Amino acid sequence: MGILEGHVHADAHREGLHLDHPQVGGGCPEFKQKNSINGYDLADIYSKSIALAGEGGYMKYRTINVYPQVDQQIDKAIERIVSGQASARESMQKAQVDSIADLKKAGVDV
């Protein structure tokens, strides 16, 4: 299943439509049979997993507005390591210190 399909299924689940619903997964015995292994309905498991992950807020960290700056700190750390300017330990420690400083500067409680 591709990323786009996953989003479609997640949207459907939010709307109360599960993968066995006619509009989403076909809702037919053949679909259920083809998507079952050892008696487990994979479509149902997948649907419930998406719902559980969404309820838990697994993407909340990406809503922090300084996420790109932290990502840039990691990119810089990798550049220092690859170019030989610093060891992996030194570079990642610097990235951590700099990232925490960026987060605090942005008002994030760390």
Image (cartoon, helix red, strand yellow):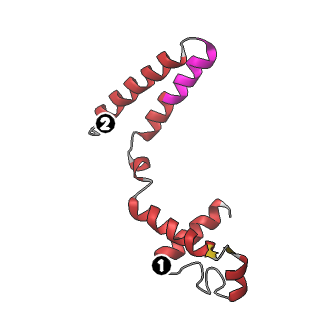
Residue type for callout 1: Glu
Q: Is residue 76 above or below residue 103?
A: above
Q: Residue 1 shows which numbered tag?
A: none
Q: Main secondary structure of the magenta part?
A: helix
Left or right of residue 44, residue 95 in this image: left
Asked if the residue under mark 2 is in contact with the one under mark 1, i.e. CB atoms within 8 Å, the reply is no
* Residue at x-position 58% and y-position 85%: 21
Left or right of residue 1, residue 48 in this image: left
- Percent from the top left, x then y, of residue 95? 45, 24
Depth check, front residue: 45 or 102: 45
The answer to whether residue 81 is magenta is yes
Residue matched to label 1: 15
> What is the CA distance from the residue labelled 1 to the residue labelled 2?
35 Å
Residue matched to label 2: 106
Range shown magenta: 74-84
- Mark 2 secondary-structure assignment: loop
- Percent from the top left, x then y, of residue 82? 63, 19
- Mark 1 secondary-structure assignment: loop
The answer to whether residue 20 is magenta is no
* Residue at x-position 56% and y-position 11%: 85
Residue type for callout 2: Ala
Q: Residues within 10 Å of mark 2 (few under 14, many from 20)?
A: few
Q: Quadrant of the C terminus?
A: top left
